[in-house]
Image (cartoon, grey):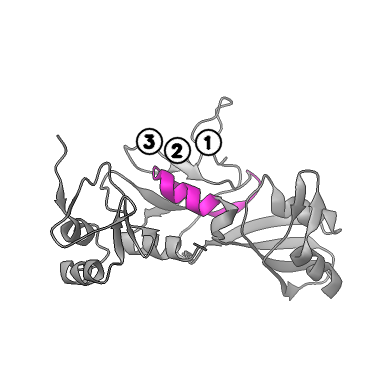
């Protein structure tokens, strides 16, 4: 039988807040256990039960891991590959069975999450939660204001309309341009297809952030495990 611990202890053990702060949150009716309000003294099975604060999941299960990885070009966003190509999971030092959170195509590089947390994966990848991903694209040509407006209004693709939340010029070079695009969904090669559709072929593409998470110290192929505070900040950045 799994051990059940007091809710404030489970939250404190996860490193999200102190026991006293957890007690205050419980008293303020901000904490729910399996979607039900809790009281001081209630206990939680960290392996099975779900806890939320302000309807945002609290990562209290010690077996759950989420890593932030800088994916190099040529590595695929998968847990395995029948053709023997290197995957994002191959780059993570863990004994857990992990999966990529969303996708980042093989020709692109940048930040991607790798996790065994199903709830986190759903919230980060499902468009309804609106957790953003930011990209820097080096493209051919000089996009006009009208082109930038098209990217945010919506571009019709083979699998439906796609649009950026924000699109801006970062730097105009001689015959190329650096663009920043903020997206809330991640269909297959979506950013590349959008930019091709508006007449600007992508030369290179880098994902610079996932929600509020960014780390300029990570080099290609390097990763680090996210803290409970970072996970909570990531989930809180979405739309409820």
Characterize the local packing of mark 1: few (<14), some (14-19) or many (20 or more) Cα atoms within 10 angstroms. Answer: some
Q: Which residue is mark 1?
A: 86
The mark that comes first in sequence, 2 or 3, is 2
- Please report the bounds of the magenta region as a residue range: 106-125
Residue placed most toward the observer, 79 or 44: 44
The mark that comes first in sequence, 1 or 3, is 1
| In this view, the mark in front (2 or 3) | 3
Q: CA distance from mark 2 to mark 3?
A: 11 Å
For label 3, the SS is: loop
Q: Are marks 2 and 1 in contact (CB under 8 Å)?
A: yes
**What percent of the width, then of the height, locates residue 42?**
16, 55
Kindly indicate the quadrant of the structure image that contains residue 175. bottom right
Q: Which residue is mark 3?
A: 97
Tell me the number on the disc at residue 119: none
**What percent of the width, then of the height, locates residue 188?**
67, 44
Answer with left or right where residue 3 lies relative to residue 192.
left
Residue plotted at (14% across, 51% down): 5
**What percent of the width, then of the height, locates residue 171?**
72, 74
Q: Is residue 124 magenta?
A: yes
């Amino acid at each position: 039988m799994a051990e059940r611990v007091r809710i404030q202890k489970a939250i404190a053990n996860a490193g999200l807040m102190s026991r006293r702060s957890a007690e205050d949150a419980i008293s303020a009716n901000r904490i729910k256990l399996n979607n039900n309000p809790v009281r001081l003294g209630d206990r939680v099975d960290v392996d099975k039960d779900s806890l939320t604060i302000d309807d945002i999941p609290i990562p209290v299960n010690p077996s759950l891991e989420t890593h932030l990885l800088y994916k190099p070009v040529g590595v695929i966003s998968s847990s395995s590959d029948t053709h023997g190509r290197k995957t994002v999971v191959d780059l993570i030092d863990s004994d857990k069975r992990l999966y990529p959170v969303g996708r980042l195509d093989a020709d692109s590089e940048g930040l991607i999450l790798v996790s065994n947390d199903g709830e986190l994966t759903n919230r980060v990848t499902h468009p309804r939660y609106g957790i953003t991903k930011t990209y820097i694209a080096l493209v051919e040509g000089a996009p006009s204001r009208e082109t930038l407006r098209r990217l945010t209004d919506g571009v019709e693709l083979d699998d439906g309309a796609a649009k950026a939340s924000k699109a801006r010029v970062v730097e105009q070079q001689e015959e190329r341009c650096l663009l920043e695009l903020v997206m809330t969904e991640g269909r297959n090669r979506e950013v590349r297809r959008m930019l091709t559709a508006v007449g600007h072929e992508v030369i290179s593409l880098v994902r610079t952030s996932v929600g509020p998470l960014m780390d300029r110290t990570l080099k290609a192929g390097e990763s680090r495990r996210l803290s409970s505070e970072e996970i909570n900040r990531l989930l809180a950045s979405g739309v409820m």
